[in-house]
Image (spheres, grey):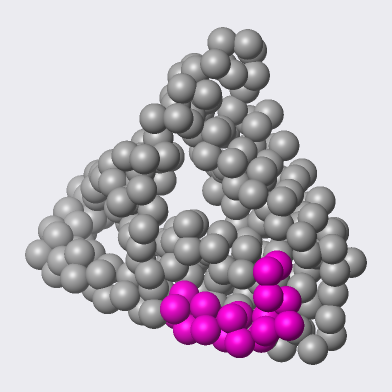
Amino acid sequence: MFDARLRHLIDPPLNKTGHWLAGRGITANQITSFGLLLGVLAGLAISFEAYWLGLVILLVSRLMDGLDGAVARASHKTDLGGYLDIVFDFIFYGLIPLSFAFARPENALPAAVLLMAFYANGASFLAYSIMAEKRNITTASHGSKSLYFTGGLAEAGETFAVFAAFCLFPNVFGWIAYGFAAVTALTTISRIILAIQVFDDPKEDSAVSIGTARDEGADKE
């Protein structure tokens, strides 16, 4: 919800640092991989209930998530870089709730509910991106990305804020997890509604069907 609005504040310092790192031979993929490693370390700290240590490592991990794109823009972007960025982000988003489930058995159910909400949200996000790419729909509201990014109530900034709240208030993990799962579900529903509005094009579908039928007829001839 706030990611696009914060871009004008976040991008300038990140881009400046990205130019500095790229000039010293550091690649975006290295930063992406380091960010995932930090995410794993944060998860381990949380699993052993070292919540403050986990929070600090989380903060640095998310800084890496912003820097990898800045370094890519300062050097050159690759499809592999975009792929790793998306995959490692999804691993990170699943890892943190799982770590809280490991920390305390009573966290298992709310963590599972939140992970289900993340799963559905991720599916709606990736499916929308694929369809947007197919129709050559682009946006720069979330910065230069390898995929089409749709906005919503639950985005990266909100997710990090919730993860930070988990670390600061571990005793109410369940309540926070259930609440954010509901917000994430609303994001999924709103994206599905948006997809219905944008992609439901009977005329285009008919044109494709007619064209396919003609091609098949030509092949038979």
Q: Is residue 201 left or right of residue 34?
A: left
User: Where in the figure is residue 180, as x and y percent of width and height?
Assistant: 52, 78
Residue at the outermost right position = 48
In the depicted view, which residue is nearer to us: 83 or 32?
32
Please say whether residue 179 is one of the residues in the magenta stretch: yes
* 186 sits to left or right of 166: left
Question: Can residue 165 be seen in the rendering of this structure?
Answer: yes
Name the dominant secondary structure of the magenta segment: helix
In which image quadrant can residue 20 be found? top right
Quadrant placement of the N terminus: bottom left
Residue depicted at x 61% and y 57% = 90
Q: Position of residue 71 (x, y in %)?
A: 52, 25
The magenta stretch is 167-185
Classify 183 as above or below 16: below
Check if residue 70 falls in the magenta segment. no
Percent of width and height locating residue 19: 50, 18
Image: 86 above or below 102? above
Q: Hey, which quadrant is residue 205 in on the image? A: bottom left
- Residue 144, percent across and down? 37, 36
